């Protein structure tokens, strides 16, 4: 696995632009739907309603609200993995704005070995499992 910096080819997919637009649009839609009181109720978790146990994403909405208010410890408290994901999106969005405005080379990860791919897969599944154990151990919050 290597990190390389490449210019975007003329016919290349502009991942930075696409994912920046997706994340900003999703955030704006969330704000419009739930933040400004357009009569929509806060989403209720069907898994929690049926089983009484929090799902993998329970607390993510409240973590996002806390994150957007700058209360990072509360965001972590509600859902640590959502907090990590929000940090990743924020870092990516800052990077995307910087490379789009400066028209500079893009960072790409290339030449993944199968061992590295498997390591990442196991790490992701482990993070999901640890996060769910955390949520289950604090289920009285939900
Ligand atoms: Zn849930």
Image (cartoon, rainbow, N blue to C red):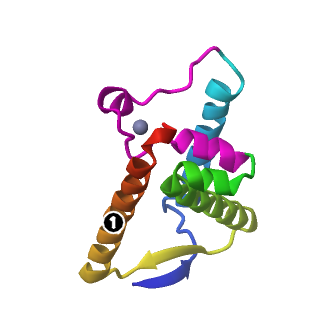
**Residue placed farthest to the bottom in the image?**
2
Which residue is at the front of the view, 17 or 117? 117
Q: Quadrant of residue 101?
A: bottom right
Task: Tell me: residue 47, above or below residue 83.
Answer: above
- Magenta-span inclusion, residue 106: no
Residue 90: % across, % down: 64, 58
Residue at x 30%, y 32% (from the top left corner)? 51
Per the image, the residue denoted by label 1 is: 126
Q: Quadrant of the N terminus?
A: bottom left
**Along the horizontal axis of the image, is 74 left or right of 56?**
right
> Can residue 14 be seen in the rendering of this structure?
no
Residue at x 31%, y 76% (from the top left corner)? 119
Q: Which residues are magenta?
A: 39-68
Residue 55: % across, % down: 37, 42
**Along the horizontal axis of the image, is 91 left or right of 123?**
right
Disc 1 is placed on an element classified as: helix
Residue 34: % across, % down: 63, 26
Task: Tell me: residue 63, above or below residue 134.
Answer: above
Which residue is at the front of the view, 10 or 88? 88
**Along the horizontal axis of the image, is 122 left or right of 140?**
left
- Magenta-span inclusion, residue 41: yes
Task: Tell me: residue 122, above or below residue 62.
Answer: below
Residue 132: % across, % down: 38, 53
> Can residue 120 be seen in the rendering of this structure?
yes
């Amino acid at each position: 696995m290597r990190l390389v910096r490449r210019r975007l080819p003329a016919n290349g997919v502009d991942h930075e632009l696409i994912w920046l637009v997706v994340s900003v649009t999703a955030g704006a839609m969330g704000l419009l739907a739930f933040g400004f009181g357009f009569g929509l109720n806060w989403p209720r978790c069907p898994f929690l309603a049926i089983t009484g146990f929090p799902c993998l994403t329970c607390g993510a909405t409240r973590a996002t609200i806390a994150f957007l208010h700058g209360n990072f410890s509360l965001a972590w408290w509600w859902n640590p993995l959502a907090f990590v994901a929000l940090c990743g999106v924020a870092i990516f969005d800052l990077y995307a704005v910087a490379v789009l405005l400066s028209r500079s080379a893009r960072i790409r990860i290339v030449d993944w070995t199968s061992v590295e791919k498997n390591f990442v897969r196991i790490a992701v599944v482990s993070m999901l499992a640890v996060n769910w154990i955390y949520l289950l151990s604090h289920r009285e919050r939900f």
